[in-house]
Image: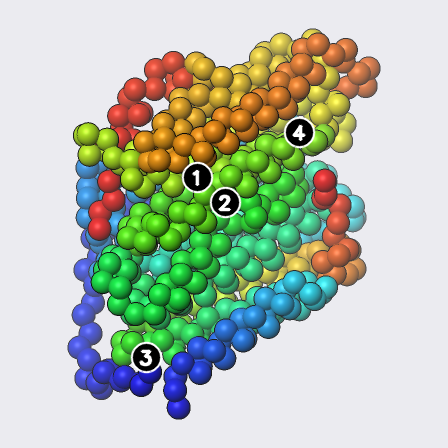
Amino acid sequence: MNPVLAVGPALPFHAPNVEYSDLLPMLIVLGVAVVGVLVEAFMGRRYRFEVQLVLAVAGLLAAFVSVVSLAGTNKVLVGGAVAIDGPALFLQGTILLLATLGVLSSAERSLDTGGVFTSAGSAIPGSEHERLLTATGVVQTEVFPLMMFAIGGMLLFPASNDLLTMFVALEVLSLPLYLLCGLARRRRLLSQEASMKYFLLGAFSSAFFLYGVALLYGYAGTVRLSGIATAVSSNASSESLLLMGTALVAVGLLFKIGAVPFHSWTPDVYQGAPTPITGFMAACTKVAAFGALLRVFYVGVGGMAWDWQPMMWAVAILTMVIGSVVAITQTDVKRMLAYSSIAHAGFVLTGLVATGAVAKSGEILGVSSVLFYLVAYGFTTIGAFALVTVVRDAGGEATHLSQWAGLAQRSPLVAWTFTLFLAAFAGIPLTSGFTGKFAVFSAAIAGDATPLVVVGVVMSAVAAFFYFRVVVLMFFSAPALDGPTVAVPSALTTVTIAMGALVTVVLGVWPSQVLDLAGQASIFVR
Amino acid sequence: MNPMNYVYLSSFLFAIGAAGVLLRRNAIVVFMCVELMLNACNLAFVTFARMQGNLDGQVIAFFVMVVAAAEVVVGLSIIVVIFRTRRSASVDGANLLKY
């Protein structure tokens, strides 16, 4: 291949036209994050917590309002770097609502003196310095700007229309999360270990993503998804670059959703991270990453679905089987929920492979079912993790399953609410989990992926076994004498759990509104 | 010289970096290997930019450098905190989370 140098010295520079009004949700969230940094720098310690909390929640709700007002937008912005279309707006709205709950439960201070987070991330666990900080009641408030930056990245991730923007969004959402994972007040060693593991593996996987982007750029001459789609359909150059590039990009994205074989970080990080952050991560990161995955595989390389579908089939089957089977042996609630989130990633993937499923109304079933599932799963997850924070003993949260024995006798309300969440995870009718599973499985059948559905149904049954083992434990075992107590949280955590439970029930009993919305939002702009 | 050779070189560098991440035990060295992988990506981007005859790849390389710099800030802070706690930056030392 001969070098071609078509770049002359006097190439004119065209500044891209930035449509600020259409980017408003992201600009609000990132702007609030920057203001949050300024508050950290200039405001007295005494007022910071309240100011940061109000800023963050107000910013998220304002961003949600602007997402709603953008509904129906269908265009490509900023010189083709960002696409604001149905799936992007639907997922942005979902992320903003989930993130609001995540911020609320992270701000909880009444369960633990000083809150969920350590007073200073730099203080050595068990040191005099740390004791002093705790004694003076220093509250960690830097988590709010960090969360806002992560949320800004999450909003951009499913909306990015070229792979460079997607890479930048991936890093903007990941880097703050690495830090947030290491800031737990209790069990700092576990938390720091989780942070390091997440960081090293996350950086490793994003390097794979980037090399994949490089190969796709070598193939198509552009990183724009529509340009790659054109190159795929015209069969422009070396197919090996395309296949390797697609595979490596898929590695980076599948890592973020925690699909097998790129799942090994999930249980460790979910267990070690502060529980409200785990809930935030499990819900919002997964929503954002599935959005990016959908866009790459439907818009970018949708033309070669025959080539990537076998790979996705294998990943989906492995993810469902390993997530469900390994969860059976878990003895820690957070770790069990982590494996269940892996299994759920597999269920969502069954919807994603159904590229050919198009309803009469023009609705792309593969996309709409995934969108719906993500809403259902996100609210249940964030509620379940928030609920884990209220079951406590002297050492902090009591996460070992044996400590949950007989919980129904100590607090029937907590036990019943957790049962509701577990029923939704298991996919019992009249909960959102059932509607979501029904949507992805019927999309998969319409897309000729019936074997996947068979595996999915069998694995749902396996998963139901370990969810109901917990239910049996809570209701029919005698509580240990030195068992945990159920602490009464402030309104922040209560609202999170209540909203999680409410959406779980509403989407199970009366899902048609959200299903319709997901159906209308299922078409990507190209 | 055939520019494709630079792509092969970049894939070698990438493989060396990936092998380093999997084999080395010191968190700082592991992290340096990740940086090597990112730089291998940069070499591939610049080479493809020349082969494709447009500037996109060269611009992307700048973006990657900025992202890599941000990653260093976050990564080193995490590793330093781990080191201060455990007096060691070995990735084998941190093994409380399992099963």
Query: With A461 as the anchor, is A25 left or right in this view?
Result: left
In whole angstroms, how far apart are the C-alphas of marks 1 and 3?
36 Å
Q: To which residue does mark 1 refer?
A: A349
**Neighbour tally class for label 2: few under 14, some 14-19, many 20 plus, Cα within 10 Å:** many
The answer for which chain carries disc 4 is: A
- In the foreground, A416 or A124: A416
Residue type at mark 4?
A: Ile
Tell me whether the residue at label 2 lies in contact with that at label 1, contact meaning CB atoms closer than 8 angstroms: yes
Query: With A157 as the anchor, is A39 left or right in this view?
Result: right
Residue in the image at 67% along x and 49% along y? A192
**Secondary-structure class at tag 1:** helix
Query: With A187 as the anchor, is A243 left or right in this view?
Result: left
The answer for which chain carries disc 1 is: A
In whole angstroms, how far apart are the C-alphas of marks 2 and 3?
34 Å
Q: To which residue does mark 2 refer?
A: A315
Q: Nearer the viewer, mark 4 or mark 2?
A: 2
Query: With B39 as the anchor, is A306 left or right in this view?
Result: left
Q: Residue furthest bottom?
A: B1
